[in-house]
Image: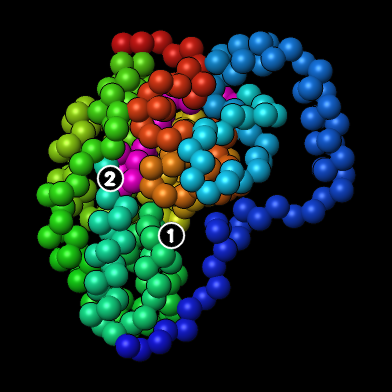
Amino acid sequence: MRSVRTRPRGRYSPSVERVADPVRDAREDQDDGDDDADDDGGHARAGAQTGVLHARRLPVPPPGTATVATPIRRRPVSTPDTVVLDVDGTLVDTVYHHTMAWARAFAEQGLDVPVWRMHRAIGMGGDKIVAHLTDDATEERYGDRLRELHGRYFSEVIEQVAALPGASRLVTALLERGVKVALASSGEGDQTRQLLSEVEGVDRVDAFVTGSDVEQTKPSPDLVQVAVEKAGGRTPVVVGDSVWDVTIAHEQGWPAVGLLCGGFGEGELTEAGAGLVVASPGDLADRLDEVLGAQARR
């Protein structure tokens, strides 16, 4: 098997690394002290009224700990009028199916890439993932063939895919609240439509954008930007299971909610910029007041 020179990768995009700033750090220390003196009940009420809250970075929990991040230092943002939902790993349980389809594709071409690294790259589009896992030369030589094989192998297991717990309830709850709902997936259009047949309410969303509709997929912001534009939104919140989703929101100045059901850890999602992290779409459906505030219902 051919050994491929791989690029060193961190847990999340380098663009969100925290840079030392003594003035900012001192100000944040003061803010933390002020927060401790505030009434906790007042904070909770303010959060419910103003929507998604930005959280201070939290320690990474021990392996296997299925906790939910609770924002500590909170700053109100504009009430969202649009919710952009990722699909794979957010509404449907496909992350490991995609991982193994890529693993088969790389192995067939004699390319040695650890499967765990493939898993951590899921959420990127097929146009980005090959170079991310290997290098530009490998993308140039093998990229199209690898994408073809991945599509074939994923199609073989697509009937095994199920919706994630509470996915239909989340989509329905968002529509009932009167916010615009947009779906943004790096996946291929027809496959994504087939996957969404497992989720109720998706036929009523305001926008549906896939990797087939844009020139560059995640972690480029194109998908999410087009989804917001098609939905007619102005103040979106992004919901996704990967650091790629959260990083896009962070770089656009939008709030983000991270889900643990794609395999990324709570600490990683928070570090990338998520203001709230929950386990599944069903758990998010139960906490929409924290994300949307006092939205009118249809």
Residue behind mark 2? 93
Magenta residues (range): 77-91
Instruction: Compute the Cα span from label 1 to label 2.
Output: 15 Å
Amino acid type indicated by mark 2: Asp
The rendered magenta stretch, by its main secondary structure, is classed as: loop
Q: Secondary structure at mark 1?
A: helix
Residue behind mark 1? 120
Between 242 and 148, the one lying in front of the other is 242
Q: Residue furthest bottom?
A: 2
Q: Please give the name of the residue rendered at 79% of the width and 54% of the height, measured from the top-left corner.
A: 20
123 w.r.t. 104: above or below: above
- In the picture, measured across the screen, residue 292 lies left or right of residue 231, that is right
Amino acid type indicated by mark 1: Arg
- In the picture, measured across the screen, residue 224 lies left or right of residue 199, that is right
Q: Please give the name of the residue rendered at 38% of the width and 47% of the height, measured from the top-left corner.
A: 262
> Residue 47 at what x, y percent from top left?
59, 18
Whether the magenta-drawn stretch holds residue 180 is answered as no
